[in-house]
């Protein structure tokens, strides 16, 4: 028992020096995102500013599957989800946001200037416009237009996310470009700054050809992103419904609180999904990525193919995640 009479919380104890600053992000597209975040982190900036800057960077890339260049829903409309969380557990999110270029900054505005956590749809757009964000043209990128036209031929509603080890035109063809590269449509990044403060951000156009109005894990605090400044932070990519069902990133952080390394914590969260329904899990992909208070990182995925990007004083590279199936 602690001196106040409470049972003491079992916080992980760190012996070696903390690696900071550091930023880790989902997918190989995380490399330039990390570079952007690093400009802030390496100048002793705050992790919350760094993760927002990284997300803004990728939202600006109209050829990327994140932001307004992303894939539309089954009605041909791009709807964006984003969230942000800082070291004080302040958080903000938007879901189903249309025609606004930087959902991450709207999410930050929700966090900083409202008493709420999530705004959705038309209300989120109205809030964005009231706060000086510009209404963009309703237009699909060339890649998205092409893919959407192909998808329309069958209009098969199959909300399965790309499984990256299937580098062929198989049942997941709509999620692949002609060159066989996969559609990675979620950017999640978590960072620790020089003050050891953790923050995270997620931005996405969500699952391609989803039902209009569908919200995935990405803007849900505890599903697509969770930060606990005492323990660590985690983010996810993949079939959002599966992540929501297990409160995925909250679970990863809780596993780290119980002493698991980031990689093992991510593995155990993947196992939670797989053990519920092995057959179903074989048809889908979920990947978790985590960073602890010591600056240690790790990831795990259900299937082969999940990669993540790391930037610290020691490294700047892409890693392949281990996988269960
Ligand atoms: N998690 C996202 C969603 O379900 C999709 C993704 O990660 O690619 O909307």
Image: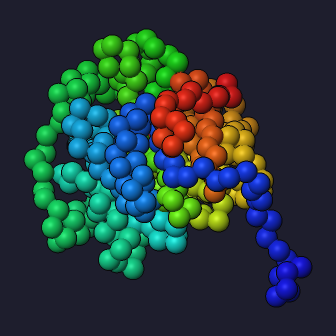
Horizontally, residue 7 falls left or right of residue 188, namely right
Q: Position of residue 187 (x, y in %)?
A: 41, 43
Q: Position of residue 154 (x, y in %)?
A: 31, 22
Residue at the (38%, 28%) spot, across then down: 183
Q: Quadrant of residue 77?
A: top left
297 over 104 or under it: above or below: above
Horizontally, residue 242 falls left or right of residue 115, namely right
261 over 155 or under it: above or below: below
Q: Quadrant of residue 91?
A: bottom left
Q: Is residue 71 visible?
A: no
255 over 11 or under it: above or below: above
Residue at the (40%, 66%) spot, across then down: 92
Name of the residue lying farthest toward the left? 137
Q: Position of residue 265 (x, y in %)?
A: 70, 46
Q: Is residue 34 visible?
A: yes
Residue at the (61%, 38%) spot, across then down: 299
Horizontally, residue 270 falls left or right of residue 193, namely right
Residue at the (72%, 46%) spot, across then down: 261
Q: Quadrant of the N terminus?
A: bottom right
């Amino acid at each position: 028992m602690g001196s106040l009479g409470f049972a003491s919380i079992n916080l992980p104890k760190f012996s070696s020096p903390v690696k900071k600053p550091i930023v880790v992000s989902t997918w190989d597209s995380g490399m330039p995102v990390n570079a952007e975040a690093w400009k802030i982190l390496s100048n002793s900036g705050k992790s919350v500013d760094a993760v927002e800057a990284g997300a803004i960077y990728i939202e600006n890339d109209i050829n990327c599957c994140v932001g307004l260049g992303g894939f539309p829903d089954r009605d041909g409309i791009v709807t964006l989800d984003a969230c942000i969380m800082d070291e004080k557990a302040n958080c903000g999110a938007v879901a189903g946001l249309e025609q606004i270029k930087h959902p991450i900054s709207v999410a930050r505005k929700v966090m900083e200037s409202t008493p709420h956590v999530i705004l959705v749809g038309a209300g989120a757009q109205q809030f964005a416009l009231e706060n000086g964000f510009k209404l963009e043209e309703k237009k699909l990128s060339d890649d998205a237009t092409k893919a959407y036209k192909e998808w329309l031929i069958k209009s098969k509603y199959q909300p399965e996310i790309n499984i990256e080890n299937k580098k062929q035109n198989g049942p997941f063809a709509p999620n692949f470009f002609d060159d066989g590269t996969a559609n990675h449509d979620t950017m999640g990044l978590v960072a620790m700054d020089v003050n050891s403060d953790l923050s995270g951000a997620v931005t996405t156009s969500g699952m391609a050809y989803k039902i209009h109005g569908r919200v995935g894990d990405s803007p849900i605090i505890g599903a697509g992103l969770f930060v606990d400044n005492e323990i660590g932070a985690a983010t996810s990519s993949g079939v959002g419904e599966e992540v929501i069902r297990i409160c995925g990133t909250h679970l990863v952080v809780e596993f780290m609180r119980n002493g698991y390394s980031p990689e093992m914590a991510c593995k155990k969260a993947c196992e939670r999904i797989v053990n519920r329904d092995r057959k179903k899990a074989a048809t889908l992909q979920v990947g978790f990525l985590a960073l602890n208070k010591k600056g240690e990182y790790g990831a795990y995925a259900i299937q082969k193919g999940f990669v993540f990007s790391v930037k610290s004083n020691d490294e700047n590279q892409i890693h392949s995640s281990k996988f269960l199936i």
